[in-house]
């Protein structure tokens, strides 16, 4: 069949299109389909890492109420935050503190430590100033006595606050002895309150009603009288709760159903109670101290070990052992606490390298002999309180035997006691101190001596002169020291 000219035109156009399609596919241009992986184009990209924010500032604030001196403050009210260099903040809880207890009336500074940063928080301490008591009923049968349930006791504190006290106070006398008005004294925290009740003669006891208010009693533990309610019925049909009853026994050594026997007013009443064997089911250990320098032991006062009994009660014990008290590593140290050979628990204590204290943070004090006064500053770690060291004057009369051992013909001296408020802090010794000598003392002829018993001189401390009035030395022990000035003393003198 003879082709038409238009057929050749169509064939030519198709070949051109196919050629362009193949050309674009091979060279990766235009809209053609890529022939193989070799035609894939990659773009190089630089990934910039986000820098880790660095902590810059630690802040701490106590937001709770005032705390009675000698009691622990609630750490739930201690807010500790870290501010980072990118402007962000974070609340942290894995911090340590210089003390858990409020030590004095007024403002207490608490040093908070987190990693290598410190901050201060302030807790206001209060002291008990007064006590008031009001009986909730006025009449008691002769031979009976009100107990803690029968009084409303209000304690007043130095900060002006009031608190209702429901336990922990004592009552005297032990019982109402006669008919008529009776004075009752309540004691709590070193304070007393008095009030009056009336003794009445209700007549003869004809019946007792006894109830035990707990589901079970446990063996080998003294029964709590607050768990027993005893009601006496008199012959005039009046009824009274009794507190001065006697128990046939207050400790049960055998488990099972046991009699609880009560006697009052010549009447004896027994009820059955269930006694379960009391035994230990677990051990719980808590470490409440701060970081510890590697090679030093942790403070025993910072380790709290509790025995858990079958009745759910936790009782603190000191009868435990640890595989070591010394901290061995920088960072987390796992300390295992044992009770016998059956129970154990672990705590984590952070170890830190020894950072030599400097005089940017000191505990300061003064000592005087009545005429001359010295100043002493101790460079202390920042996790200790600035008031941790106590300097007390010691009279010449008490140290004259030690002074005579120096066999000086003339001179003067100031004696003082150097002690820690918390004896556990003695673990921080040795520490460097700076002593500023009094006017009239010459630096070349003034030295510090240690006397262990105020009768003998153990030795002279080292001495590095800082200024014409101040020198540094190292103290290795607490106790009595004498700053002695005498023209007879020289730097290279050897003491007997």
Image (cartoon, rainbow, N blue to C red):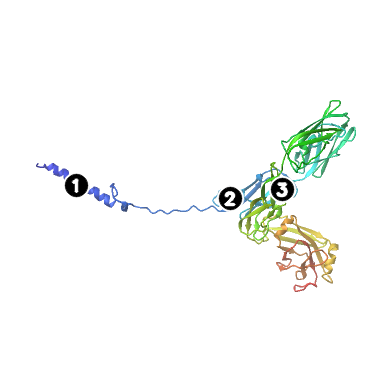
Give the residue displayed 75% in from the left and 62% down from the top. Answer: 477
Q: Residue 458's quadrant in the figure?
A: bottom right
Give the mark nearer the N terminus: 2 vs 1: 1
Residue 380 image point, x, y percent: 69, 59
Give the mark nearer the N terminus: 2 vs 3: 2
SS for callout 1: helix
Report the mark closest to the observer, 2 or 3. Answer: 3
Report the mark closest to the observer, 1 or 3. Answer: 3
According to the picture, the residue beneath numbered tag 3 turns out to be 316
Label 1 crowd bin: few (<14), some (14–19), many (20+), radius 10 Å: few
SS for callout 2: strand
Label 2 crowd bin: few (<14), some (14–19), many (20+), radius 10 Å: some
Tell me if residue 364 can be seen. Answer: yes
Q: Residue 245's quadrant in the figure?
A: top right
| 91 or 350, nearer to the observer | 350
Q: Where does the N terminus fall, quadrant-wise?
A: top left
Q: Residue 13's quadrant in the figure?
A: top left
Tell me if residue 440 can be seen. Answer: no
What label sits on residue 15 in the rendered view? 1
Q: Where does the C terminus fall, quadrant-wise?
A: bottom right
According to the picture, the residue beneath numbered tag 2 turns out to be 83
* Mark pair 2, 3: CA separation: 38 Å
Residue 28 image point, x, y percent: 29, 51
What label sits on residue 302 in the rendered view? none
Residue 92 image point, x, y percent: 60, 48
Residue with the most extreme top position:
236
């Amino acid at each position: 069949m003879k082709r038409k000219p238009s057929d050749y035109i169509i064939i030519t156009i198709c070949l051109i299109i196919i050629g362009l399609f193949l050309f674009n596919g091979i060279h990766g241009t235009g809209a053609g389909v890529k022939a193989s992986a070799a035609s894939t184009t990659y773009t190089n990209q630089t990934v910039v890492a986000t820098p880790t924010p660095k902590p810059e500032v630690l802040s701490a604030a106590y937001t709770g109420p005032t705390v009675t001196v000698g009691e622990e403050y609630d750490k739930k009210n201690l807010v500790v935050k870290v501010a980072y260099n990118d402007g962000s903040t974070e609340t942290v809880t894995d911090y340590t503190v210089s003390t858990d207890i409020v030590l004095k009336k007024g403002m207490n500074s608490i040093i908070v430590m987190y990693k290598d940063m410190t901050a201060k928080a302030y807790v206001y301490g209060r002291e008990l100033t007064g006590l008031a008591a009001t009986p909730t009923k006025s009449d008691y049968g002769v031979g009976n006595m009100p107990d803690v349930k029968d009084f409303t006791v209000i304690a007043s504190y130095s900060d002006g606050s009031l608190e209702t006290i429901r336990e922990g106070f004592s009552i005297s006398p032990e019982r109402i002895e006669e008919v008529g008005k009776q004075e009752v004294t309540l004691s709590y925290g070193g304070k007393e309150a008095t009030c009056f009740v009336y003794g009445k003669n209700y007549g003869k006891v004809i019946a007792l009603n006894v109830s035990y208010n707990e589901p079970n009693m446990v063996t080998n533990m003294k029964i709590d009288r607050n768990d027993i309610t005893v009601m006496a019925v008199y012959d005039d049909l009046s009824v009274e709760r009794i507190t001065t009853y006697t128990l046939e026994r207050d400790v049960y050594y055998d488990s099972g159903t046991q009699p609880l026997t009560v006697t009052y007013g010549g009447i004896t009443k027994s009820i059955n109670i269930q006694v379960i064997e009391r035994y230990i089911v677990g051990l719980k250990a808590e470490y409440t101290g701060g970081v510890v320098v590697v090679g030093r032991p942790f403070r025993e006062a910072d380790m709290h070990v509790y025995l858990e009994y079958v009745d759910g009660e936790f009782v603190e014990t000191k009868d435990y052992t640890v595989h070591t008290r010394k901290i061995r590593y920088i960072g987390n140290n796992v300390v295992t606490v044992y009770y016998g050979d059956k129970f154990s628990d672990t705590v984590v204590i952070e170890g830190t390298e020894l950072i030599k204290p400097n005089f940017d943070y000191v505990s300061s004090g003064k000592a005087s002999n009545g005429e001359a006064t010295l100043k002493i500053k101790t460079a202390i770690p920042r996790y200790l309180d600035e008031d941790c060291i106590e300097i007390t004057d010691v009279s010449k009369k008490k140290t004259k035997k030690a002074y005579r051992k120096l066999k000086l013909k003339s001179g003067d001296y100031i004696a003082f006691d150097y002690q820690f408020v918390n004896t556990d802090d003695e673990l921080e010794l040795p520490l460097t101190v700076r002593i500023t000598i009094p006017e009239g003392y010459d630096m070349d002829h003034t030295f510090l001596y240690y006397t262990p018993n105020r009768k003998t001189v153990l030795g002279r401390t080292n001495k590095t002169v800082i200024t014409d009035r101040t020198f540094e030395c190292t103290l290795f022990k607490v106790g009595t020291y004498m700053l002695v000035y005498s023209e007879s003393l020289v730097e290279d003198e050897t003491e007997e």
